[in-house]
Image (cartoon, helix red, strand yellow):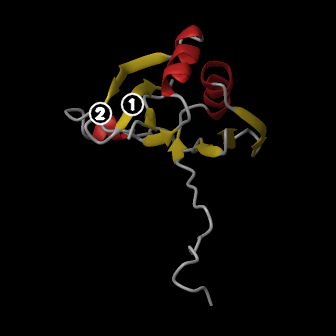
Amino acid sequence: MADDATPVTSPRWSIAPYFIVDDVVATANYYRDTLGFKYERFWGDPPAFCMVYRSGIIIMLSQLEEGGLMRPNSEADPERSAWDAYVWVDDADALIAEFRGKGATIARDICEQPYGNRDFDVVDCNGYRLCFGHSIT
C-alpha cells in the first residue's frame, strides 16, 4: 500500500475511434498518403476493415456491405462543425505544415483556444472532422 507521499500512477488509457467509410482501401490510403498514418493490413475479402495508426493512436476504418451508413458528426450537427475525434499532439504547428504540404483539407486554421489548446481541424476524404492540438497551458 502506498503512503500519502508516493504518487499513485494508473495505466495510460487510449481510444480508437471507429469510422464507417464508403471505401476502406481508398480511406486507408488517404490516411497514409495525406495524414502520415500507416497500416499493416486489411481484413475481409473484399477488404472491409483496416486500422491506421500514427504516434500511438489508432483509427479503425470499416466499410459495411449495406453502404450509406457513414455519418460524420458534422453532418449530424452542421451548425457546430462537431469533431469526430480530437487528437493531442506534440506540435500542432509542425503538423499543420506537414498536412498542408500533402494537400490535406484544413477546415479550420490553427489558433489558440480558450480551453488552453492550440489546434486546427482537418476534414478527411469521407467528411470526418479531426482536430489536432497541443496544450499551451
Quadrant assignment for the N terminus: bottom right
Q: Residue at x 67, y 19 (%)?
A: 33
Give the residue type that dot 2 points to.
Gln
Quadrant assignment for the C terminus: top left
Q: Nearer the viewer, residue 69 or 118?
A: 118
Give residue 52's quadrant in the image.
top right
- Judged from the image, the secondary structure of the residue bearing numbered disc 2 is loop
Give the residue type that dot 1 points to.
Arg
Instruction: State the residue lying farthest toward the right.
Output: 40
44 left or right, relative to 61:
right
34 left or right, relative to 77:
right
Q: Residue at x 69, y 42 (%)?
A: 50
Q: Say if 85 sits above or below 102 in the image.
A: below
Q: Position of residue 25 (x, y in %)?
A: 68, 30
The disc at residue 113 is: 2
Instruction: State the residue lying farthest toward the left.
Output: 79
Does the residue at mark 2 contact the one at mark 1 (Cβ under 8 Å)? Answer: yes
Q: Position of residue 119 (x, y in %)?
A: 40, 30
Badge 2 local density, few (<14 within 10 Å), some, or many (20+)? few
Q: Say if 16 sits above or below 50 in the image.
A: below
Q: Nearer the viewer, residue 44 or 104?
A: 104
Badge 1 local density, few (<14 within 10 Å), some, or many (20+)? many
The disc at residue 118 is: 1
- How many marks on residues? 2
Q: Position of residue 106 (x, y in %)?
A: 42, 18
Q: Residue at x 50, y 41 (%)?
A: 88
- Judged from the image, the secondary structure of the residue bearing numbered disc 1 is strand
Q: Nearer the viewer, residue 3 or 114?
A: 3
Q: If you read the primary sequence from the N terminus, does the residue marked by circle 2 or circle 1 appear first?
A: 2
Give residue 102's quadrant in the image.
top right
